[in-house]
């Protein structure tokens, strides 16, 4: 199981760069991220090299953020891989709240990041079906 940092930030020019500057200054590497926005605020979700330190420094800079458990599933970079995973989740009656993509830095393989209601149950389900869960 992986941890991500979810940052709730004002939707204005330069905010994302401000966040990345804070992390850069603290030598925290961003391994994967996705942003979702609304008119006034957005959520930046990131997998970083040091989750606890990222939370501390972002909160010290007045960002509202939290740590969330997520699942990473490494898969082949070929047509149908994501569909196969999603079909397995559907067959298991598992709802996915959101997904995004990052890469395993060591293998170069794509990693689909998933957030679901019951992380432990879904992680075990996927492992029993032969998926490479991180």
Image (cartoon, helix red, strand yellow):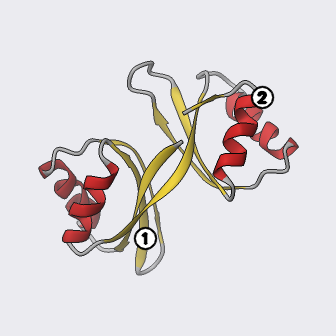
x, y (%) of residue 45? 43, 56
1 or 2: tag closer to the N-terminus:
1
Please give the label number shown on residue 42.
1
Q: Which residue is denoted by mark 2 in the rendering? A: 129
- Residue found 23% across the figure and 75% down from its top: 62
* Horizontal side of residue 7 vs 89, given as left or right: left
Quadrant holding the C terminus: top right
Element type where label 2 sits in the image:
loop
Residue 15 sits in which quadrant? bottom left
Q: Residue sitting at 31 percent across and 41 percent down?
A: 49
In the rendered image, residue 88, in percent from the top left (x then y), is placed at: 80, 37
Q: CA distance from mark 1 to mark 2?
A: 35 Å
Q: Residue at x 41, y 65 (%)?
A: 66
Q: Nearer the viewer, residue 111 or 79?
A: 111
For label 1, the SS is strand
| Res 71 quadrant in image | top right
Q: Is residue 96 left or right of residue 109?
A: right
**Can you say whether 44 is above or below 31 in the image?**
below
Expressed as whole percent of the image width and height from the top left, the position of residue 115 reads 60, 53
Instruction: Report the side of 68 relative to 25 (left or right).
Output: right
The residue lying furthest to the bottom in this view is 40
Q: Residue 58, percent across and down?
A: 25, 64
User: Relative to 38, does residue 116 appear above or below in the rendering?
Assistant: above
Mark 2: give few (<14), some (14-19) or many (20+) Cα within 10 Å. few
């Amino acid at each position: 199981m992986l941890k991500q940092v979810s940052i709730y930030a004002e939707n204005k020019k330069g905010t994302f760069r401000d966040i990345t500057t804070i992390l850069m200054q603290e030598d925290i590497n961003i391994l994967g991220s996705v942003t979702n926005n609304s008119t006034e605020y957005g959520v930046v979700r990131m997998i970083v090299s040091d989750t606890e330190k990222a939370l501390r420094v972002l909160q010290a800079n007045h960002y509202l953020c939290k740590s969330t458990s997520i699942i990473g599933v490494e898969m082949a970079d070929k047509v149908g891989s994501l569909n196969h995973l999603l079909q397995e989740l559907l067959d298991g009656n598992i709802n996915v709240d959101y997904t995004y993509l990052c890469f395993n830095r060591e293998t170069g393989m794509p990693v689909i990041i998933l957030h679901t209601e019951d992380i432990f149950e879904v992680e075990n389900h996927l492992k029993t079906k032969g998926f490479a869960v991180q």
